[in-house]
């Protein structure tokens, strides 16, 4: 079973494709942009990637430019992802129906703050794919958020191949709420 074939992920991709608004997939920690390219080109959904490191972001932009140039030469139009060099805590998640968190190198505080922001801003039922296991009961409390705000709900785990491991476990979660959290969760 692949990540895109997992039932919650497939449903989220279909919701994005069927939406009449600016719904999209989001990749936090988009690195060289590959997850964004897979979503935009392989799954045919609008995708936005956020990467904090300028060198990785610049490489992803060069890849986007090369793909655009090649497509033009072939007379094709590609729906490429939008790539941002910015802090994910400053992103707008209000139209995100599928979020991919490349969080394997994040500290616990950042993971908790991102989980709380997803719960606060994403549409109810949005799906989250994460590289890192989630302690769904403690995340929002660690971010300084009231315990009344529920965390992400674990739906299932899917094993897939990554560059550093043949059988890697991805965690598929769901956003259970859209309640506003007390105060903004920005990077400042």
Image (cartoon, rainbow, N blue to C red):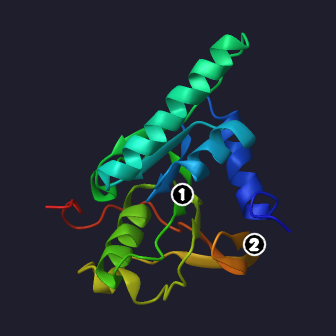
Q: So how many labels did they put on this image?
A: 2
Q: Earlier in the sequence, mark 1 or mark 2?
A: 1
Local crowd size for mark 2, using a 10 Å CA cut-off: few (<14), some (14–19), many (≥20):
some
Please identify the quarter of the rendering in which residue 133 is found: bottom right
Q: Are marks 1 and 2 in contact (CB under 8 Å)?
A: no
> Is residue 56 something one can see in this rendering?
yes
The residue tagged 1 is: 99
Q: Is residue 28 left or right of residue 97?
A: left
Nearest to the observer: residue 165 or residue 29: 165
> Is residue 43 something one can see in this rendering?
no
Please identify the quarter of the rendering in which residue 87 is found: bottom left
Is 128 situated above or below 140?
A: above
Please identify the quarter of the rendering in which residue 172 is found: bottom right
Nearest to the observer: residue 69 or residue 124: 69
Give the percent coordinates (x, y) of residue 123.
51, 53
Give the percent coordinates (x, y) of residue 120.
38, 62
Residue drawn 44% across and 44% down? 59
Is 60 situated above or below 145?
A: above
- Residue 160, label in figure: 2
Q: Is residue 53 left or right of residue 6?
A: left
Residue drawn 51% across and 27% down? 65
Local crowd size for mark 1, using a 10 Å CA cut-off: few (<14), some (14–19), many (≥20):
many
């Amino acid at each position: 079973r692949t990540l895109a074939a997992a039932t919650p992920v497939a449903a989220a991709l279909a919701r994005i494709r069927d939406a009449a608004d600016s719904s999209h997939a989001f990749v936090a920690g988009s690195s060289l942009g590959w997850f964004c390219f897979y979503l935009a080109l392989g799954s045919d959904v609008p995708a936005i990637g956020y990467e904090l490191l300028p060198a990785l972001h610049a490489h992803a932009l060069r890849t986007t430019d090369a793909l655009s140039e090649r497509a033009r030469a072939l007379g094709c139009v590609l729906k490429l992802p939008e790539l941002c060099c910015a802090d994910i805590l400053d992103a707008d998640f209000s139209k995100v129906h599928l979020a991919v968190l490349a969080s394997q190198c994040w500290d616990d505080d950042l993971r908790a703050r991102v989980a709380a922001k997803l719960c606060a801003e994403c549409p109810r039922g949005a799906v989250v794919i994460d590289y890192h296991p989630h302690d769904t009961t403690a995340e929002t409390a660690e971010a300084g958020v009231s315990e009344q705000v529920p965390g992400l709900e674990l739906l299932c785990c899917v094993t897939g191949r990554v560059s550093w491991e043949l059988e890697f476990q991805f965690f598929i979660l769901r956003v259970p709420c859209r309640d506003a959290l007390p105060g903004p969760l920005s990077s400042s």
